[in-house]
Amino acid sequence: MIEVRDVHHVYLRDSPLAAVALRGISLTIPDGERIGLIGPTGSGKSTLVQTLNALIRPTSGTVSVDGEDIFAPKADRRRVRQKVALLFQYAEQQLFEETVAKDVAFGPRNLGLPEDEIATRVHEALQSVGLDPDRFGPRSPFTLSGGEMRRVALAGVLAMSPKVLILDEPTAGLDPQGKAEFLQLILRLHAQRQLTVILINHSMDEIAQTTERVIVLDAGRVVMDGPTRQIFARAEELEHLHLGIPQTAQILHRLRARGLPVRTDLFTLEEARAEVLRVLRPA
């Protein structure tokens, strides 16, 4: 469990260029949840997730992981980052080793694990992201496609055996098929590894497809927090924040505005079709 209590963060504090990023954030994130983190540009999303894995120390407030204050003087922040892993946007730009296997092994090797344990983790991590270890392990990561490189970067994170996986715009730059495959991969990893997943994304459709809870930030504050369907039912509030709602929900809202009494908290084409038929062909 992650607990955030009254966290504030100010960049360049006590200087003429001081900028407030977080303003009293309080959250509880239980194990195993799939969470979408959304908000306008500059709302504090990236600052918040970098605080969760101890990359950024808050100006005030506390962050606890499994009951341990991660910014306490004796806290082992390297262990925190092993538990709470962060995959940055365009993660393939973080690849640097000669081979895929060496790149995935980099994190576990820095933990001082024995070589046989490292080899096992590399093998399992590549399999988890859908890459054959025997085929891809010896290759240079720079000979792979963009989607394959992103999977290698994700494998490097998974090789650390995290409990929480934070993904910042993980499908940015991928084609539609690549995006769909990567989102399905995230859902599969969540189920197989019992991960807590926190997803930052500007695509409301992708958030709707992959999460069960949505947290909305604006100007460094939590302005909404609840089940995904309930949050996206608040279309006017989201549009006021320039966030919008999934495309299928937009269509249902327009139908409702024209007098058709349809539900507006549905996100897939199958759900929308069934709802329209239900209203047009009542039993």
Image (tube, grey):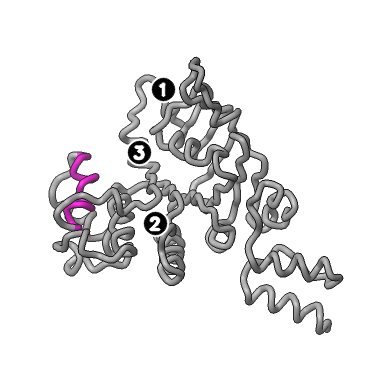
Task: Give the residue displayed 43% in from the left and 72% down from the top.
Answer: 177
Specify whether 8 is left or right of 140.
Answer: right
Between residues 21 and 106, which one lies in front from this camera angle? 21
Task: Give the residue displayed 55% in from the left and 63% down from the top.
Answer: 209
Residue at numbered disc 2: 193
Q: Residue furthest front?
A: 16
- Magenta part of the protein: which range? 100-111
Task: Give the residue displayed 17% in from the left and 60% down from the top.
Answer: 140
Label 2 vs label 1, nearer the camera:
1
Instruction: Describe the element under mark 1 as helix, strand or loop.
Output: loop
Q: Position of residue 53 (x, y in %)?
A: 41, 37
Task: Give the residue displayed 44% in from the left and 47% down from the top.
Answer: 166
Label 2 vs label 3, nearer the camera:
3
Q: Are marks 2 and 3 in contact (CB under 8 Å)?
A: no
Per the model, the C-alpha gap separating discs 2 and 1 is 29 Å
Other residues around mark 3 within 10 Å, as few (<14) / some (14–19) / many (≥20): some
Amino acid marked by disc 2: Arg
Between residues 120 and 101, which one lies in front from this camera angle? 101
Amino acid marked by disc 3: Arg
Other residues around mark 2 within 10 Å, as few (<14) / some (14–19) / many (≥20): some
Whether the magenta-drawn stretch holds residue 238 is answered as no
Residue at numbered disc 3: 81
Q: Which mark is residue 72?
A: 1
Between residues 165 and 44, which one lies in front from this camera angle? 44
Q: Residue furthest right?
A: 259
Per the model, the C-alpha gap separating discs 1 and 3 is 15 Å
